[in-house]
Image (cartoon, grey):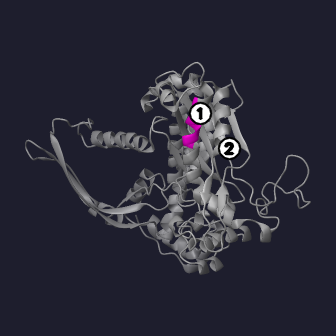
C-alpha cells in the first residue's frame, strides 16, 4: 500500500471533522497505510475489537510423532510489529467494551442454564419444574439520600429526573454514616456466606427435618451477582433453586415449594448478622441486611411477569459493571492525594476517604486497597457447585471450537483429543506488552462497534424466526 504524505493542516482539519486530536489521527493514518494493515485488522477482529490486547512474541511447531515431520509451524516474525495480539479478557466495560460483551454473554448462558436447564452445559431441563426464585438482598440505610419515590417528591423537596447527578447522594453529608457504608460493602461477602448457611437451616425447620436429613432429600443451589446502588452500597441479586438430593437431575420433595423457599429466604436474611469490633475511633457495630428483601418466583416465558429470559439478561447486565454508577474510578488508588486529580462526585470521594480512614483501624480488611470499589472486595458473582456450568468451561468450549477451525485450515485432523499421541507441539511465547497506540485504539473501537452491530443484527433476525423463544441469545 502506498503511503501518501499528509500536510499538518490537513491532519488538523480531518481531526476536527472526526472529533479526533491531530496526533491520534496522524497515528491512525500511519497504521492504515502500513504494509501489514490487513493482517493487523484480522488480528484485531479475532480479538473482537479488544481495547487492550495482550501482545505476544514467539513460535509454535506441530510435528508428527512417528516421523518427526513438521506438520505446521508459525512465528510472530511475519506479523505486524512482530507480535500476535490476543484479547485481554477484562470483564469491565469501562476497560474493554469488546471483552466485557463476551463476558456478559458467558454470564447470561451460565445463569440461564441454571434456570431453564441445558444438557450441553451439564444441567438437566427438569430444573424448570423445580422451585426457582429471584431474590434481592439490600443494604440498610446509612442516612437519607436524594431519591425518586414512587409518589411525591424527594425529602429535599425537589423532583429529580432519572439522570440527576444528585440521586443517591447524602441529604446531610455531615450526618451520613460513611464508615458504616464502606464497612457493609467490605463485609458483604461475609453476610452472604452466613446467609447461605442459614438458608438450609430455615428450609429444614419448615420441613420438620434436621439439617442432616435435609441433605438426604433436598439441595439448595444458587447463582448470585453484586450490584452497586447509586448511593454506593452493594446489594445482591440471586437465583435460588431447590433440587433433589442428586442435584439438578433429581426432583425435590413435594413439600419443597416456591412459597416455602420465599419464606425461608426472608427468615434467613433476617437472622444474618456480622459483628465488627471497635477499633481506634470507630465503635463496635453489627452489620445486617437491609429490611427490603425482595423474592419473586421465576416462570417460563409467558407464565410469570418475571421470565427466565429476563432474569438471565438482568444478571448479565451487571457482569460488566462495578461501582461506576457512583462515579468512582476503575483502578486502585495509590494515595489519597490522587483524589485531587480525579473528577469525583463529593459523595463518592467521602466514601473513598472513609476507606482510607478505616484502613489503619481494620488492617486485615484491606479497605484502602479496595477504596476504588468503595470497600467491596468480593467477586461480582458466585455460584454453588451444582447450580450450573462454569465460566471456565464456557471459555474452553469457545477455545476448542476455534482450535478445530484452525486445525482444519492447516490441513490437520480437527480431533483435539489426540489420545494416540500422533502429534506433538513445541511452543515458546513471551509477553511483549499490552494495549494499542492512539490510532490503533481508534481503529479497534470502530471494528468493535462493527462486530457488535453485526451480532445485534443477527440476533434480531433470529428472534423473528419461529421457535426463537427457546434459543439462547444473549441480551
Q: Residue at x 40, y 64 (%)?
A: 1
148 relative to 306 in the view: left or right: right
**Alpha carbons under labels 2 and 1: distance apart:** 46 Å
What secondary structure is found at the residue carrying circle 2?
helix
What secondary structure is found at the residue carrying circle 1?
helix
Instruction: Confirm whether the magenta stretch covers residue 456.
Output: no
Residue 461: image tag: 1
Tell me residue 364's x, y (percent): 50, 66
Mostly what secondary structure, the magenta segment? helix
Please say if 290 is above or below 125: below
Q: Nearer the viewer, residue 357 or 411?
A: 357
471 relative to 47 in the view: left or right: right
Q: Nearer the viewer, residue 256 or 310?
A: 256
Q: On the image, which quarter does residue 305 sit in?
A: top right
The residue carrying mark 2 is 270
Q: Which residues are magenta?
A: 196-204
User: Would you say residue 36 is visible in this rendering?
Assistant: no
Tell me residue 316's x, y (percent): 58, 44
Amino acid at each position: 500500500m502506498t503511503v501518501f504524505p499528509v500536510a499538518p493542516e490537513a491532519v488538523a482539519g480531518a481531526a476536527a471533522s472526526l472529533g479526533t486530536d491531530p496526533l491520534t489521527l496522524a497515528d491512525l493514518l500511519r497504521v492504515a497505510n502500513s504494509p501489514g494493515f490487513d493482517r493487523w485488522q484480522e488480528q484485531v477482529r479475532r480479538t473482537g475489537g479488544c481495547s487492550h490486547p495482550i501482545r505476544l512474541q514467539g513460535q509454535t511447531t506441530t510435528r508428527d510423532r512417528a516421523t518427526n515431520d513438521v506438520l505446521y509451524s508459525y512465528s510472530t516474525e511475519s506479523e505486524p510489529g512482530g507480535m500476535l495480539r490476543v484479547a485481554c479478557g477484562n470483564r469491565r466495560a469501562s476497560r474493554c467494551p469488546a471483552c466485557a460483551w463476551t463476558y456478559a454473554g458467558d454470564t447470561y448462558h451460565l445463569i440461564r442454564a441454571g434456570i431453564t436447564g441445558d444438557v450441553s452445559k451439564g444441567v438437566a431441563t427438569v430444573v424448570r419444574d423445580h422451585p426457582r426464585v429471584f431474590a434481592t438482598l439490600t443494604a440498610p440505610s446509612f442516612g437519607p439520600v436524594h431519591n425518586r419515590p414512587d409518589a411525591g417528591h424527594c425529602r429535599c423537596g425537589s423532583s429529580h429526573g432519572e439522570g440527576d447527578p444528585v440521586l443517591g447522594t447524602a441529604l446531610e453529608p455531615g450526618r451520613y454514616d460513611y464508615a458504616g457504608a464502606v464497612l457493609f460493602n467490605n463485609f458483604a461477602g461475609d453476610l452472604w456466606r452466613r446467609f447461605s448457611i442459614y438458608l438450609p437451616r430455615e428450609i429444614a425447620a419448615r420441613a420438620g427435618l434436621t439439617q442432616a436429613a435435609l441433605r438426604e432429600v433436598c439441595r439448595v443451589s444458587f447463582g448470585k451477582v453484586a450490584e452497586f446502588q447509586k448511593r454506593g452500597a452493594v446489594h445482591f441479586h440471586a437465583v435460588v433453586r431447590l433440587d433433589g438430593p442428586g442435584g439438578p437431575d433429581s426432583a425435590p420433595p413435594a413439600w419443597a415449594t416456591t412459597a416455602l423457599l420465599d419464606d425461608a429466604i426472608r427468615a434467613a436474611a433476617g437472622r444474618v448478622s456480622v459483628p465488627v469490633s471497635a477499633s481506634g475511633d470507630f465503635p463496635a457495630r453489627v452489620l445486617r441486611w437491609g429490611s427490603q428483601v425482595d423474592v419473586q418466583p421465576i416462570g417460563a416465558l409467558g407464565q410469570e411477569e418475571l421470565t427466565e429470559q429476563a432474569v438471565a439478561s438482568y444478571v448479565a447486565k451487571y457482569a460488566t459493571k462495578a461501582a461506576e454508577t457512583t462515579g468512582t474510578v476503575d483502578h486502585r488508588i495509590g494515595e489519597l492525594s490522587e483524589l485531587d486529580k480525579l473528577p469525583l462526585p463529593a459523595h463518592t470521594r467521602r466514601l473513598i476517604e472513609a476507606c482510607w480512614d478505616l484502613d489503619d483501624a481494620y488492617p486485615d480488611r484491606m479497605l484502602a486497597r479496595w477504596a476504588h470499589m468503595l470497600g467491596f472486595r468480593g467477586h461480582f458473582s458466585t455460584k454453588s457447585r451444582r447450580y450450573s456450568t462454569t465460566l471456565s468451561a464456557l471459555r474452553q468450549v469457545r477455545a476448542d471450537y476455534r482450535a478445530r477451525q484452525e486445525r482444519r485450515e492447516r490441513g490437520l485432523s480437527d480431533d483435539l483429543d489426540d489420545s494416540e499421541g500422533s502429534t506433538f507441539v513445541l511452543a515458546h511465547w513471551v509477553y511483549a506488552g499490552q494495549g494499542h497506540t492512539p490510532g490503533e485504539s481508534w481503529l479497534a473501537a470502530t471494528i468493535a462497534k462493527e462486530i457488535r452491530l453485526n451480532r445485534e443484527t443477527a440476533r434480531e433476525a433470529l428472534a423473528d424466526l419461529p421457535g426463537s423463544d427457546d434459543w439462547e441469545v444473549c441480551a
